Amino acid sequence: MGHAIIKVMSFSVDVWNTIENRGVNSDMETQHIIHNFEPIYNEHSKILMLGTMPSPKSREVGFYYGHPRNRFWKVVSDVCGEAYPETREGKIAFALRNGIAVWDVLAGCDIKGADDSSIRNPQPNDLSRILECADIKAIFTTGTKAFQLYKKFCYPKTGIMAIGLPSTSPANCRTSYEQLFEAYSEIKKYI
């Protein structure tokens, strides 16, 4: 019994937070979520970066990659050699200035919290509105589930194979910032 107590006591707060963020909490119920963020893009966009679906924290703050520990805006701004954009307006201006379009693969789904593995009944976004406006050179997905969903639902329509990048979510604590920076440096070839 003493061993079990020691193990539980040494279980880190970050690990508990990660489990909560992934929706492993058995109290969480599946919800039907409709994506209501407009995509970030203009006619000068060169790459399209697609997540899966806004997390509960992103929906709460009303913007992409809104969890304070999500590393998306930090790594992309570092790769582009710019200061971290602090505000929503700053992030939009940064993305447009660098030819980066941002949206998500899904327009809606049933999901438990932020747990991508719990996604059911996925409804893909219509990416043609971006692809018809901008000369997109490459499409990147931010995470394994985004890549899988893109490949299944979007690739048959776009004919553009996505480049899968690691997730910047706080749930992906096994990928170091240095590894993220190296992987996301691929975007520089296209912008």
Image (cartoon, helix red, strand yellow):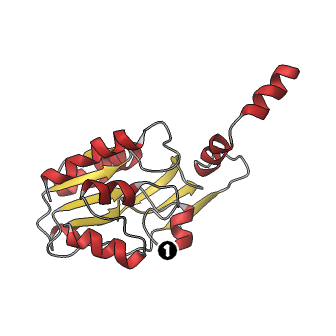
- 107 left or right of 191? right
Residue 12, compared with residue 51, is above or below; it is above
Q: Nearer the viewer, residue 188 or 18?
A: 188
Mark count: 1
Residue 54 x %, y %: 47, 62
Residue 22: image x %, image y %? Answer: 58, 47
Outermost residue, right side: 1
Q: Residue at x 73, y 51 (%)?
A: 27
Viewer-proximal residue, 119 or 62?
62
* Residue 125 seen by the camera: no
Residue at horizontal 24%, vertical 47%?
185
Indicate the quadrant where residue 52 lies: bottom left
Relative to 13, 124 lies left or right:
left
Q: Nearer the viewer, residue 36 or 55?
A: 55
Position of residue 176 relative to residue 106, above or below, is above
Quick one: SS at disc 1? loop
Amino acid carrying mark 1 in the image: Gly
Place of residue 94 in the rendered image (x, y in percent of width and height, measured from the top left): 28, 71
- Identity of the residue furthest to the bottom in this view: 89
- Residue denoted by label 1: 62
Q: Position of residue 163 (x, y in %)?
A: 24, 46
Structural crowding at the residue carrying mark 1, measured as other residues with C-alpha within 10 Å and reported as few (<14), some (14–19) or many (≥20): some
Quadrant placement of the C terminus: bottom left
Q: Is residue 8 above or below residue 76?
A: above
The quadrant of the image that shows the N terminus is: top right
- Residue 77 shows in this picture: yes
Q: Residue shown at 21%/72% (left/top)?
A: 97
Quadrant of res 110: bottom right
Name the residue located 35 percent from the left edge and 75 percent from the top edge: 90
